[in-house]
Image (cartoon, rainbow, N blue to C red):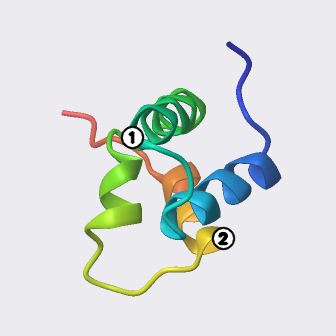
Amino acid sequence: MERLTRDEMIALVDRLQRGEGDDEQAGEWIDQLNQSVPHPAISDLIFYSDEELSPEEIVDKALAYRPIEL
């Protein structure tokens, strides 16, 4: 599966935030997002963030994520 562009990711996050699609479709969208960003749990940013984030902010945070190297 090809990585999504930033604009495609923003569109999917927007759809997820608005509750579009059924559970199966939402799961597929989250899988696509997970394969396109280094963040280990973009769904946490979408559904469980302490702050109210726009789709653009969520995607930018997910793209900027860098794992801690030990």
Which quadrant of the figure has residue 23? top left
Residue nearest the viewer, comparing 14 with 67: 14
Image quadrant occupied by the N terminus? top right
Task: Give the label on residue 23, or none.
Answer: 1
Numbered-mark total: 2
| Label 1 CA crowd tier, 10 Å (few <14, some 14–19, many 20+) | few
- Is the residue 40 above or below the residue 10 in the image? above
Q: Amino acid at mark 1?
A: Asp
Residue 59 left/right relative to 31: right
- Is the residue 3 above or below the residue 20 in the image? above
| Label 2 CA crowd tier, 10 Å (few <14, some 14–19, many 20+) | some
What residue did someone put label 2 on? 56
Which quadrant of the figure has residue 45? bottom left
Cα gap from disc 2 to disc 1, whole angstroms: 23 Å
Residue lying at 33% horizontally and 65% vertically, measured from the top left: 47
- Is the residue 27 above or below the residue 49 in the image? above
Q: Amino acid at mark 2?
A: Glu
Question: Percent from the top left, x then y, of residue 29?
Answer: 55, 38
Residue 19 left/right relative to 6: left
Question: Percent from the top left, x then y, of residue 17?
Answer: 50, 68
Image quadrant occupied by the C terminus? top left
